[in-house]
Image (spheres, rainbow, N blue to C red):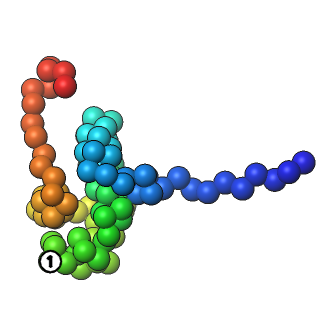
Amino acid sequence: MNKVKLRRWDSAEYLKTEEDIILYLDACLQEADDDAAYIAKALGNIARARGMAQLAHDTGLGRESLYKALSGEGNPEFSTIMKVVKALGLKLHVQAANQSV
């Protein structure tokens, strides 16, 4: 029997366009419910797709601290999340929970 080689799925490999990134983050925001680590991890995937070194430069934060904060294991401050969102050229929007997109 032939062995099948599997690799770990990496969302960052598939975030190639602005539209990919926007749709991905929107889906993660909807899926996350109240799981802040899920959102941090999604932003980390986007940051890796764009380049963590550039993001560190744009936010003024250390690359290692960004990796930790956006790993899904860290607990980043909201100000860090907002710096990352802004540096990625994104905006967060709010709508009433009972409205559909």
Q: Quadrant of residue 80?
A: bottom left
| Residue 60: % across, % down | 14, 77
The front one of 97 and 8 is 8
Front one among 66 and 57: 57
Q: What residue lies at 48% left-to-right and 56% top-to-bottom?
A: 10
Looking at the figure, which quarter contains the C terminus? Answer: top left
Q: Amino acid at mark 1?
A: Gly
Image height of 61 relative to 75, above or below: below
**Residue neighbourhood size for the residue with mark 1, other residues' Cα within 10 Å, grouped as few (<14), some (14–19), many (≥20):** few
Q: What x and y, as percent, mark residue 17?
A: 31, 52
Task: Please report the residue visible at 32 percent of the width from the left and 69 percent of the height from the top.
Answer: 51
Residue 83's image quarter?
bottom left
| In the rendered image, the vertical position of residue 80 relative to residue 91, given as above or below | below
Asked whether the viewer can see residue 53, the reply is yes
Residue visible at 41% across and 57% down?
A: 12
Q: Residue at x 15, y 57 (%)?
A: 89
Q: Is residue 77 visible?
A: no
Instruction: Tell me: 81 left or right of 33.
Output: left
Residue 53 location, quadrant: bottom left
Q: Where is residue 1 drawn, in percent x and y?
A: 90, 48
Task: Tell me the residue that label 1 is attached to.
Answer: 60
* Extreme-right residue of the structure: 1
Residue sitting farthest toward the front: 17
Q: Quick one: SS at disc 1?
A: loop
